[in-house]
Image (tube, rainbow, N blue to C red):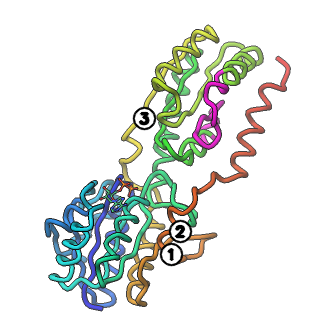
Amino acid sequence: MRKIAVLTSGGDAPGMNACIRSIVLTAEHFGIQVIGYKHGYNGLLEQEYLPLRPKNVLNLIQRGGTILRSGRCLSFKQVDSAKLAAKNLEALGIEALLVIGGDGSFHGACHLADYWQGQVIGLPGTIDNDISGIDATIGYYTAIETALESIDKVRDTADAFERIFLVEVMGRHAGFIGLSAALASAADQVLVPELCQDIHAELDNITQHVLAAHRQRGNSSYIIVTAENLWPGGVTSLAQMLSEKTKVECRVVILGHVQRGGSPVSQDRLLACKLGAFAVERALAGDNRIMVGEVNNQLVALPIQVSWESQKPLDPYLVKIQQEFFDITRKLNP
Ligand code: ADP
């Protein structure tokens, strides 16, 4: 193998740069040239790329974002786009394409593979952690850390004014960030899609819990971590309803895109190092249409469609203890 390419696509995640670095250094070790396509699949269609040598990835591991930029490319779903991308890859003599992104980007890689002779390999990079079949995605741990730091700060001001705070985190389809950040910050409640099938029914539950907490602890802060897009009209309208029902002032903090940014934490850097190196090794071994990842701390190469064939469940043990901690408030006497 002489030449491979890498791109970052879809929602960016801290650790993507660390992963690019690992790919470039491992490729150098095996005497393979690397090029990086810019702006996701857009770069592949427009032949926008740059050579990546070890000197290009110095001082990179700690940087958030992606030096290749990311992008969404809706036209890539078309057959003509996949054919054009295949032609462009062939023109440059690329033998394998490594795609760092989420399951949408992996769909794109498979679509390309239908029209291209080369190998496609997915590396899971998304803060949402919603890729089935593997333990964690690059960027997830940093996103929890960012949410956690903010919730800790919100708690200080919530305490001072004895308010309810609703903290909205990312994850409209998956509650991994919400559940982990809630548990790690000792939030009083967590509202995520997997655990709130009927959010209207939840409102009474939330109200009763807030009132029970106030009876027990006197006026004190009360933190609810909620995933985005759960409540019709948004988190602000939920806050309004809660204020009315509980007669306690309820404020909103929307963390938004800050969760995507920042320097990756050590777990994301290490995962990025391992997966980048392993992906190059799998490319050399001739693998195609695979995703690399870790399962129980072991590196694995799985068929890429595993990433989207089923919905990744929340850790049942985390769900159980969150529920137990939550119930304790209702059972304790004032
Ligand atoms: P993520 O990779 O984070 O899940 P998206 O779902 O936005 O992000 O997908 C990123 C990009 O992957 C899309 O903009 C598009 O270029 C490509 N893509 C997604 N789904 C498909 C598909 N079914 N066929 C071809 N390309 C796709």
Amino acid beneath label 3: Leu
Of circles 3 and 1, the one toward us is 1
Q: Which residue is mark 2?
A: 306
Quarter of the figure with residue 69? bottom left
Left or right position of 113 against 128:
left
Q: Residue at x 52, y 28 (%)?
A: 231
- Mark with earlier residue (2, 3): 3
Tell me where the magenta segment starts and ends, as one range. Answer: 183-203
> In x, y percent, where is residue 185?
60, 38
* Label 1 packing within 10 angstroms: few (<14), some (14-19), many (20+): some
The Cα–Cα distance between marks 3 and 1, rounded to whole angstroms, is 34 Å
Left or right position of 20 against 162:
left
Circles 2 and 1 in contact, beta carbons < 8 Å: yes
Q: Which residue is mark 3?
A: 255
> In x, y percent, where is residue 245?
63, 11
View quadrant of ligand 1: bottom left
Q: Which mark is residue 303?
A: 1
Q: Nearer the viewer, residue 80 or 104?
A: 80
Q: Residue at x 22, y 76 (%)?
A: 35
Amino acid beneath label 2: Val
Left or right position of 202 against 133:
right
Secondary structure found at label 2:
helix
The Cα–Cα distance between marks 2 and 3, rounded to whole angstroms, is 31 Å
Image quadrant for the N terminus? bottom left
* Label 2 packing within 10 angstroms: few (<14), some (14-19), many (20+): some
Q: Residue at x 58, y 9 (%)?
A: 244
